[in-house]
Structure formats: C-alpha cells, structure tokens
Image (cartoon, rainbow, N blue to C red):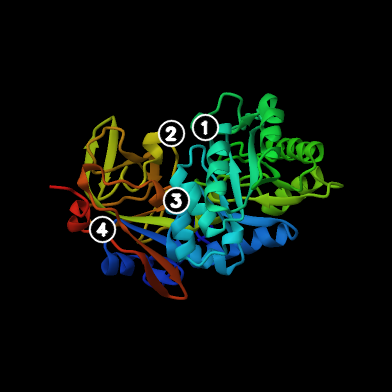
Amino acid sequence: MKAVNLPDSAGINEQGNLTIGGCDLAGLAREFGTPLYIMDERTVRERCREYAKCFPNAEIVFACKALCVTGLLEIIASEGLGFDVSSGGELYTALKAKADPKKLYFHGNNKSSREIREGLAAGVGRFVVDNIYELKNLDAATRELGLRANILIRVNPGIEAHTHEFIQTGKTDSKFGVPLDQLDALVQEVAKLELVSLKGFHAHIGSQIFEAAPFVAEAKLLAGLTKKYGTEELDLGGGIGIPYLSNEVAPVIADFAAQITGAIKGTDVKLILEPGRSLVGSAGMTLYTVGAVREIPGVRKYLIVDGGMSDNPRYILYGAQYEAFPVSQPEAARSETVTIAGRFCESGDLIIKDGKLPPVKAGELIAVAATGAYNYSMASNYNRVPRPALVVAARGQAELAVKRESYEDLVANDAI
C-alpha cells in the first residue's frame, strides 16, 4: 500500500486484507468489534524521531488535544518529547503517563483557579498565559502556595493562515492571545510579580496548514519580541497539516525545519514546537462495519456504518475530507461513488460525501484513513452510544489502549 494518508506499516496480507502494524484488520474487528480506532505505533515513533532529527536543538512538545490517551502518551514520552496540555484532565493524563513535569506546557485561554493550582503543584515547566485575567489568577495561586511559575505569553500575531475559519487561531479576530498593541502593558504587569517570571512568547496560527510562509512570518515576529523584551524562548505552537486524501502532498518536515531555523538564524533563543496532528494523524485508522446500503437512483448511494459523528465529528463540524479503504482487497478499482453515512440522528452525520470506493456490501468492513487526530479526542456519547475501543498495533500484536464503553459506563455518573 502506497497511499500517503495510510500509516507507515500499512500492507496487504496473503488473504488480501489490509494490515496495520502486522495486524489483519479483519482479525481486529473479530477480536475487538467495530467501530474501532487503530493506531500504528511505528508511525507515531517515526514522526517523533523525524521532528527530533530535523530540529536537533529545539524542544518538541506533543499537543495532547490531538489524542490524549495514557498509553499513547507513554510511547511519545519514551521518545523524549514533552507535552502541551490545555486542561486539568490532560495534565492528569500526562502525569499518569509518567511525563516529565518540567516538559509540560500548560495552555488554555481560561484555566480555572483549580487547574492553575494543579499545574503549580505538579511543577509544570511553563504556563502559557493568554490574558490579564489568567495572569492575576496565576499570581494569586503562586502567593497562596509559595510556588514559582515560569511563563510564556501567548500573543495574537495577526497572521491569517490558509485553512478552515474554525481552525484559524492567529488572525486578529480571535479569542486567543494577547493583541500586540496590549503586550507592553502585560509585560509590565508580569515584571511587578514576585513569583512569576517571563521566559518568552508563544503563538499558534491555526491547524492543517500546508504552507511554510505563515510559520516563517510567525517565527520572525516572535524572534523580534524575544529580542525586544530580553527573553530566551520562542514557541511556534503547531499546525502543520497532514494528507487526508491519497493525492494530497503534505509539508516535508525537513524542508519546514530548514525554513524555520533559517528565519531565526543569528538569534540566541530556545525554539519550542508543539506538533499534534502531524505526529499522530496519519498513524490512525477507524474500522467500521457497513450496515444498510441505501441507493436513491440518480441521486446518491449511501453506505451506512455502525459509527459516525460521535466517533468522528470533523465532517459535521467543518466539512473535513477523508478517504476509506475496504478491508478486503483494498487496492481494487474504485468504480462506485458512495457517501459513507453514520448511524446518528442528524442529516449531516457523514464521514465521506461522494467518495470513490470499490463495490462494498452490507456486513463488509471499511477503514477510514488518517483518523489519529481529533477523532477519539472529540468523541461524544450522542444518542447515548458508547465510545469505541482504541488499540495500538505493532509487531503483529494489537494492545488495548482504551476499553470500549459499556452501557453501564454511560449511566455511571447519572444521579438518580
């Protein structure tokens, strides 16, 4: 299998079935059921190593929001990466995965006082401060606990990246970051605080970006700020795109690295990067069983699967595109135009609209590619449907990383 949106280990076995990590996906369906999230350990490790190789002097920090699962974070931590956490829950999960607290960057544009205290108690390396309200809460917590906080200030760089409006985060009209014309005042406030120290600046311009140019502009802007305010750290955030379709061409990390390091050449700063999707997105596939097949002559053919928007809400959120493969004979000619729809009570509950597939019948398995990021992490229990299991495949074995939810799990927190 050569499709660029598949995990690195993807192949076809003697039975003609798609495999990941040496595991037959049909066998995984029998063992674990469907829907099923599958992560390829090899792809995750290779992406971690690629970033480390291309940015040898930078700190690489995985953006947990892409996929925050204890077992996966253990794999990433074993590759020497830190973690970008943006809630108390992500912080707790990273600590359960035995992450080095000094490599934790605590994000969030409205951290609660409890979360701030949890971060201080854990000894996180950096708080990323988004606004004056948070700075005041952080100051109060440091004085209450007698603990020091090192911070980066998240700035709004006013850079509009070419991506979907909902995942642009660096444009002027955004809920994130300190506007540049308010930065002087905030830096002056930090200087007054006894237990809060400014180490540098952070920005994040958006997600699923294929061009290096906006990142270069961001790097130059932040380098200028570190020089102006006498700080040492420059955090570019994440946002590099991945191929969701087999004909897409994703950024080459080595080329991206060359442009970024070139933009800050001659500056004495510590570079921090926070990749999320580009570490885990292509490592994942989601396995479904086709149920009803609904054909409307002259209009559309629907394949209705046993999952949908509760395990992958990205289509209904912003029209995200995917590609699917039949588990049996995945390289067969794609002779039919079909829409893969979910089982949930929304007309917009689609996974792929008008995509190409070989003929697929009820009861057969299909695997949707590039679902490692923002699928499990955004999953819900809509229609009171339990969330799927997640397994990590490697060396011909699949290890359960998240158990399939039961009906009892659904009602466990209900108060009667």
Mark 1 to mark 4 CA distance (whole Å): 32 Å
Task: Identify the residue shown where x is 59% and y is 47%.
Answer: 127
- Can you tell which mark lies on residue 318? 2
Task: Identify the residue shown where x is 62% and y is 45%.
Answer: 237
- Can you tell which mark lies on residue 71? none
Q: 276 and 95: which one is in front? A: 95
Q: Is residue 315 visible?
A: yes
Q: 112 and 84: which one is in front? A: 112
Residue type, numbered disc 1: His
Looking at the image, residue 309 lies above or below residue 406:
above
Q: 12 and 203: which one is in front? A: 203
Task: Identify the residue shown where x is 61% and y is 39%.
Answer: 204
Left or right: 297 as drawn, with respect to 20:
left
1 and 3 marks in contact (CB < 8 Å):
no
| Pointer 1 or 2: first along the chain | 1
Viewer-nearest of discs 3 and 2: 3
Q: Which residue is mark 4?
A: 405
How crowded pointer 3 is (Cα within 10 Å; few <14, some 14-19, many 20+) is rated as some
Mark 2 to mark 4 CA distance (whole Å): 27 Å
| Pointer 4 or 3: first along the chain | 3
Where is residue 375 drawn, in percent x and y?
A: 40, 49
Residue most extreme to the left: 416
Q: Which residue is mark 1?
A: 164
Mark 1 to mark 2 CA distance (whole Å): 7 Å
- Can you tell which mark lies on residue 88? 3
Rendering quarter of residue 52: bottom right
Viewer-nearest of discs 1 and 4: 4
1 and 2 marks in contact (CB < 8 Å):
yes
